[in-house]
Each structure stands twice: as C-alpha cells, then as structure tokens.
Image (spheres, coloured by chain):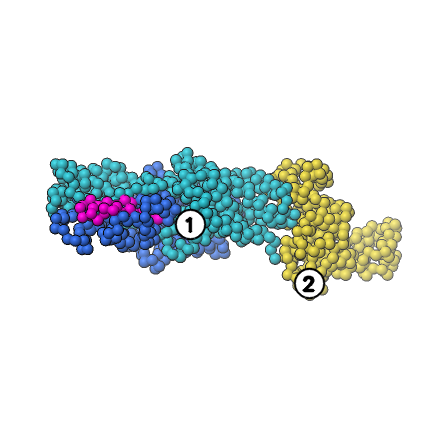
Amino acid sequence: MSRRFWSNIAAVAWKETQVMRHDKAFIGVVLIQPVVMLVLFGFALSNKPANVPWAVLDWSQSPTSRRFVQEVMATGYFLPPRPVVGYAEGRKLLREEKALVFLAIPKSFRRDVERGRPAVQLLLDGSDPLSAARVGVYIGQVATAFETRAAPQDPPDSHMPVREPGPIETRQRFWFNPTLQDRAFFLAALGGMLLTNLCLSAMSLGLVGERETGTYEQMLALPTTAIEIVLGKLVPYVGVAYALMLMATIAAGAVFGLWPHGSWLALLVVTLPFVLASLGIGVFVSALARTSAQAVFISVFFIMPSFVLSGVMYPYQFMPHGVREIGAAFPLRWYQIASRRIIERGAGMAEVVVPMLALTVLFAVVLAGVRWRMKPRLG
Amino acid sequence: MSWRRLRTLIRREVRATLRDPFTATILVVVPLGALLVFGFVLSTSVKHLSLAVLDANGTAASRRLVAELAATGTFDPRPVSTRAELQRALVSGRASVAIVVPPDFDRALRRGAAGGGRPPEIQVLYDGGEAVLAGNAEGFLRAQLAHTGATLATTDLSRRPVPGQAGVDVVTRALFNPTLDGTRFMVSGTFGFVLSFLTTLITAVSIVNERLAGTFEQLQVTPATSLEIFLGKILPLGAVFALDVLLMALVAGFALGVWPQGNLLFFLVVSTFYVLVSLALGLLFSATSSTAAEAVQKTVVFSIPLVQLSGFAFPIRNMPAFFRWLTELFPATHYIRLSRAIYLRAEGPTALLPEIGFLVLFGAVLIVLALRSLETRA
Amino acid sequence: MSDLSIEVMPGTIFAFLGANGSGKSTTIRMLIGLLRPSAGTVEVDGIDVIRRPRRVRDHIGYMGQKVSLYQGLTLRENVEFYAGLYGLAGAALAQRWGALCERFALGEAEAEKPEDLPAGIRQRAGLALATLHRPRVLFLDEPTAGVDVRSRGLFWELIQDEADAGVTVFVTTHFLEEVEYCDWAAFIDAGRLIANAEPEELRQRYSDGYRIEVGLPPAARDSAARALGGIAGEVAATSGGLAIRVPALDPPVLAALDRLVAAGARLDIQQPQMNDVFRRLLAASGAPA
C-alpha cells in the first residue's frame, strides 16, 4: 500500500463522479428506471384478482341461490355475473376468455340448503392457474361461510335441523399485511431490484466504456495501483446505490404508506455487502464483454434471471427444489429476504444476520472471481 | 423494388449476423434460457411449505392432524412449544404458515361430531408479507384442514355418519389445465416476452452499429430504396427469430412437456408476424440513439414495463383502469393473448380475428414509421 | 451553411477545403442527397438532387469519412455486396473488380476482413468500391484522413487517374497541401465560402509569392540581381547567392530563371504554403485566423 493510497482512491472516485454526471445513459438508469418500477409495482402489477368476469348458471332461481351469488359479489373481486342458460354457453364463455369462472347452481339448491347437503359446481379457466386458484378459493370461502340456516323469506319449518358449520372451523389472521396487498410484497423488494440493475449494468458499462475510449490504459500508466483504481471506481457507485435505495424506500413510504416497520440501521447495514457483491459481478461482466453493447447485453441477461429466481416477483418457496437452490446464488435473493423482513415484518439486526453472512460470502466469491479474471489484464 | 437488390441485402445481413459469435449465442441461449427459467421456476404446485405447529392439545387426534398435513408433502410441519417461538418462526421466515391447535381440540372434535357444541377452532397464521404465497397457501391449507377434519371426525367415532358439510360444498374443476400447473401458462407467455424484448434489442443494436460505422450512410447513397433496406434487415432477422420460435416450441415440448393445444403452424405464422412488428420497433429505437449502449438502455427501459404490463406474468384484469387501457395499445399484449389462446385453449383463426386484426393494424403503423425513419433526414 | 454557390466542371478535381467543423461534410451530404438544404438547389450531372435524390445514385460514387466496409465480411464479400446493389455481377463484376484490384493493388487484401487491414489499404479499398460501378461523379469526404504520407501520395495518383478518365471528382479535405493535386479549390470557414478559384490564383492573391533561392557564386550575384530586379519583388543577398520573391511563376520570371540555370545557377523554389494562403484568406474575409 503506497502512501498515497487513499488520496489516489479519492482522485479516481472524484473523476468517476464527474463522468457519471455527464453520462446520459447512466442518468437514465438512475432516474427513470426507479420511477418506472415504482409505478409498475406500486400501481399496476398485482396477483390479487380484481374485475373478475364470471358467469352463473342459476337453475334454482330462488332467493337462496340469488343470495349466494350476492355474497360472492360482496367479496368485491368480481364483476357483475353474466347469466347463462346452459352448460354449453358457460363453457363457451370460458373458452373465449370472457369468463374466468363459471358457477352452476343446481335446481335443487334451495332444498339442498334446507336439507343439509348443498353443493354447487365451479368450472375454472385453468389457463391462468394462479388467478383461477385464488378465485376458486374466494368462492370456496363464501361457500363455507354461507349461512345455511333457513333464510327469512323461506317459510319456517320447525322440523328442520339446525345447521352447523363443519367439523373444524378455521379462522385466519394475516400478520403484517392484513389486507393481503401484493403491493407491499413488491415494494419491499423494489430497492433490491433497482440496485441490482444499477450495480450490474452501470458498473460493467462504465468499465467497458473506459476500455473502449482508452482512458483505462491511460490510468494504468499512472502511478496508481490496480486496487486503487478498482476501489476508486467502486466508491461513487456505492454512494449512488445508497442514494437510490433511500429514494426507493422513502418513495414507497411517502406514496404508498409502506414505511419500514423494522430497523433502518439494519437496512442500511445489510445493503453494503449486497451492493459490493453486485458491483463485483458488474466488474466481472465487464471483463467478459468486448464492447459496451455487449456489456449491457450480458448484464441485462443476468439481471432477468436474477429477478425471477431470487424470489422478488414470485415466492421462491414455491419453486421446485433444484431451482430454489440456484436462486440462492444470486445476491438479490438474500437481500430481498432481508429487506422484506425488515420493511414488512419489523425485523432488526438479529433477524437478518443470516442474509448478511450469505451476502458477505457471495461478495468474497465474486471478488476472488474478479481477481482471477482480471489478473492477466492488470498484472 | 428490385428483387436482385433485395437478395443482395439479405445475403449480406445473413452472413454478417451468423458470423458474429456473440449475437449467434444470444439468439439461441436467451430464448431457451428464458423458456427454461420461466417454465421450470414458476409452477403453482405447492410443496414443502414450512408450517409451524403449536400443539396445545397433545393428543392422538391432534398428532394425527399434523401427520395428515405432512403426508401429502404440501407442508413440512415444525413443532414449536410457545407462542413466542411461533412468532419468532414467522418473523424470521423459518415458517411460512403457522397453526395453533387449541387445548380442547380432541374434546371439541368429539362434541362437534356428536352433534352438539362448537367445533374445535384451529387458528391459522400467515405471513402476510408473502402475500402471493399466503394467497395460494390459504387454499391448500383450508382444503387440507377441512379434509383432515372430516377424516378425523369419521375415524374417531365409531362409524357415525358425518352430520353435515361445512356451509356449501363446492365441486371444482379446472378447464384447459386440470392440474392448475403454472408451467403451461408461463411457457405460453414466454414467447411474448422473448419476442418482444430480444428482437427489439438486437435490431436496435445492429442498426446503431451500422450508423456508427458509416455503412448505413453508404447504403443510403446506393440505388437501394428504403423499403429494400428495411426488408433486407427485417426479413433475415425475422427468419432467424421464426426459427427461434420453432426451437422454443420444440424445447418446451420435449423438455417441459408443454405442447401447443392448438395448431402449431398457425402459432408460427402469428409469431413470425409479431417478430416483424417487434423488429420495426427496434428500428425506431435505433433511429433515436447515438450509441449502441444507449440503444440497449432505451430498449430495456421501455421494453421491460411494456412486457410486464402486457399480461405476461401479471394478469391485466388485476390492474387499475388506466393501465388496462394503456396496455391495449401494446402489440405485445395482443400477441400474448394470441399465443395463450392458441397454446392453452386451441383457439382457431376465426375466433381470434379481432386480436389478429389489431396486431396487423398496429404492426402496419409501426412499420410505416420505421420506414420513414430510414429516409434521409432534412 | 450559408450563401454557398459552386460549380464543378466535368472531368476536374474540385477540392473543398476547410478546418474541422467548417461544414465540409454537411456540404457533401447535401450534394449527394443525404441531407436536404433548407434553401437552394443542387444539380449533379444534370439531375435535380433535391427533388429526385434517388435518380442520382446510379451516377455517383461516394466514399465517406468512415470507410464503409462491413466488418465481419471479407473485402471480396463487401465488393460483391455493393456490386449487387448496382446491378453488377457475374462476369462483368469479375472483370471490373479484377482491373480495379490490380490498379489499386488490393490483390492480397481481397480475402481479409477490413478490421485486419491497415488504414492505407482500407482507404484504397474504399475508393475502389466507390468507383466500382463507373460513376460519372465521385464524392470523397476526407479520403486521406488517418493515412500515412506515402499512401496519401499513392491515393492521389489514383484520384488523378480517375479524373483523367473523365470522372468529375469532388473532394473534401483538411490537409491544405492536397490542393496541389486539384484543378480547383474552394475554401469554407464556419459555413461560408471564402474562396472559390484555381489554386494558382489563390496563391497569387493571398501570399507573399514564391521565394526562390538562387545558388550562385558571389561573382555572378550582381549580374543576376540586375537581371531579376525588374521582375522580382524582392531581391536579397544570401550566403549562397540570392533570395528573391516573385508573386507568380509567369513567363518572364520563368525565362529569367531558365537563363540563370543555363548559366549554372541552382534554384530552390519554395511555393507559398497553403497554410499561409488560408490564413491570409481568413484574415481577408474578416474571420479570425
């Protein structure tokens, strides 16, 4: 370590910051992407069904059956039902994607309700299984809760047995997210997504760009060591990353009311190994690419699987086993676990120790990879 | 238009593209990679969800309940002994779901079966933070508990008939995808994803590189017309991507077991047309970029939201009204609808006419705009 | 660009000179129909370029600043590509390219890719491609930029061959000395035309004239000085003889010099530098040098 280690790093860092300020593409990434993603995940995208079109074949045509339909409507997920007069019509609507579910209420429904064995048939459009399953569940919930005692309009009959609910009643409570909004799920991981994008594409692009314009070689000719150059480059990116993360967190809170329930400190601390690991991957990518277009290409096609396999869009717990483990190699997986824990579940430092360790290990691995790859170049 | 000139242009494009190892790799690896990632990763069958169990009853009946939950492989029960421990398990993420079996579980079960008194109440706690997870797990858990309860009730008592069902029984069946396997859904959407994103990207980069190298300008000085230049670029790339679609369809079939329910040829034709539309869009992006990296960035920033909003992974129906309207303007949305309709529901050309018509209309607009961008600038 | 009015005679080499950023490339692009001027007319080979840009393309050849060879294709494949666009193929192409190849000394480079060729050969290849289809007018935008001095000389030989064959050549360059190879020169500065004449005329008008060193034994100095006194502007004595300045090498001057040479004097004629000419031009036109 030369005596001028820190000042060299500072000099490189300062130059880097200046370059960043004038790089239009970089500014685009830093400013436009976050807004776009915020809008997408905060407003637009959701797995929670809404405006569900459905069809009803009501053969019973009784107050009881109408009550059932009303109770389904009362859940708020459904559009007004399309009445159909036969099975064929119902299936046709499903086939044409004009209905997601088709409810068939038998003629004997009212009697069945009184007698104690009511049943309805539900046909789902299985093309979109997630939506179909959820909607099926909602209707199932209505069905389970359906008051099967005699309705006031029906003539009183003292011989009717008192209906009871089933053997086991389940009462649910959703911790941390009482209305089960998908939004919180995504927004809590927004910072991680933005940072991955920044660290990967911006970093690799920056390095390759330098190589292309020749300033990289120029730097190597200066009395700075390779380590000083790399660290000097990393520093401003770390700064921007933190700024971005804070921006995303504050935006989620200010716009959507999703303020972190847990420790801000923990969030800030766990961000560091994540950013370092991601930047390291960016450096590695830059070593693989020969042109700047290639660099962006490669990083984009690393970011995509990163988003999918890490579990930010879709829970990793649902993935088949082999794939689940592969996702653990992505820094984003551990970061989203930590950030979700902190933001949604109010966790503190203690609860995110495991992700932090995992991220540190990943960073070490990436660093080793970078040094191995860059050796001939910097040596 | 001169066919000979067009042939010359196409021949050059093919030679140049195929000789670039990077592009060639991207053209094969990315579509297949996307297919496998999306296809394998996103299946809706729930397996081995960790379930924290606080058994305050501790009888054979309650142990039987837990065993039944584990039996199907859906849940991995982990016993906890205090509420605090249960809470910690949920917070730390060691458990995704938790149930509390009340102390009077077995007694209440017998009482309920005998026809009097309140049935036992199992408290179920979800990590609402994992909203997607919770939503799906809920259905499974309810079904399991209800099923288990019924079984318990009948085996515990000496062959007394089950006094009744919970509320209304719902007999459910799923059309078009009886096992509710998410693979088919994601695979059919992946075509839209890849064809929207990759095609635009590659075209934009290619054109920008040509502009930078000066070869584009040279081309404009030759007798080649804008239409010929446009087709000379689009047709070979289109052919390559059409092959890609075929490749993807084959891999999806052999590796993932997902074959189109409908007509494969029809699907290929529709996909090829959509490819041409996407390529035109890529041309437009390149017209506004001065470096290749900028073209890529633009494509990424624009294409990702477009694809997300196009119903590829998140249903359009669930979106607020503004986005639902907005997304109708994207050709991607219509293509994804088409590919799903053909892949999953075997729909034919006549039924899909409006979607096809829309795609043709928007495609034509984009192609005209792209052609104009190739003309000399004032 | 403003107020630009030029006329190029067939079969001549027209040099369009100016510093970087003065508008040379813009002009050439307007001439070949890549850019549309906001006002004015452009006529090339009798065709109105603004209204019918396409018509002109079969008659012109263009070599841009970036030599437009496709990377990833060999030179031969590039040739086949461009030839195909002009309708040149098969035996006709083979013959034409064979001849060009020989003249431009590109035989060894045929199978190479442009990125593997040195700049000098790339430029020659670019010129060959531009003339492939026997255009009547050639537009060359800074064709010798980035090429070493020796290759530049060779290059200009080739251009002059084309002009001799009747091709009209319009060349832009920022190497002022290249004016020597041309029949006409126009200077532009910041979008304005500040000169438009034969090189010789420009040298006469905007310079100190020719400086000639006459090597003489001291004895002959006086007589030579007297002989030259009437025609030369300045006559000065130097250690080796005389140094004179003449505005132009017109017949009286040449005759006097001939006589001196016949009497055994050695001459060292220094042409006015184009840099000089240009600077004076700029000064005269009121622009900062």
Report the side of A361 relative to C101 (left or right): left
Residue B123 seen in render: no
Report the side of A233 relative to A167 (left or right): right
- Residue C159 horizontal/vertical position (percent): 73, 47
- Region rendered in magenta: A99-122
Question: Chain A in the picture: what colour?
Answer: blue
- The residue shown at (61%, 53%) is B376
- Residue B116 horizontal/vertical position (percent): 11, 46
Q: Chain of mark 2?
A: C
Residue assigned mark 2 = C3
- The residue shown at (29%, 52%) is A180
Q: Are marks 2 and 1 in contact (CB under 8 Å)?
A: no
The crowd level at tag 2 (other Cα within 10 Å; few <14, some 14-19, many 20+) is few
- Name the amino acid type tagged 2: Asp
Above or below for C185 versus A220 = below
- Residue C80 horizontal/vertical position (percent): 65, 40
Which SS class for mark 1? loop
Q: Which mark is residue B310?
A: 1
Residue closest to the eye, C155 or C58: C58
As drawn, the chain in yellow is C
Residue B254 seen in render: yes
As drawn, the chain in cyan is B
Residue closest to the eye, B376 or C103: B376
Whether A103 is among the magenta residues is yes
Residue closest to the eye, C67 or A61: A61
How many numbered circles does the render carry?
2
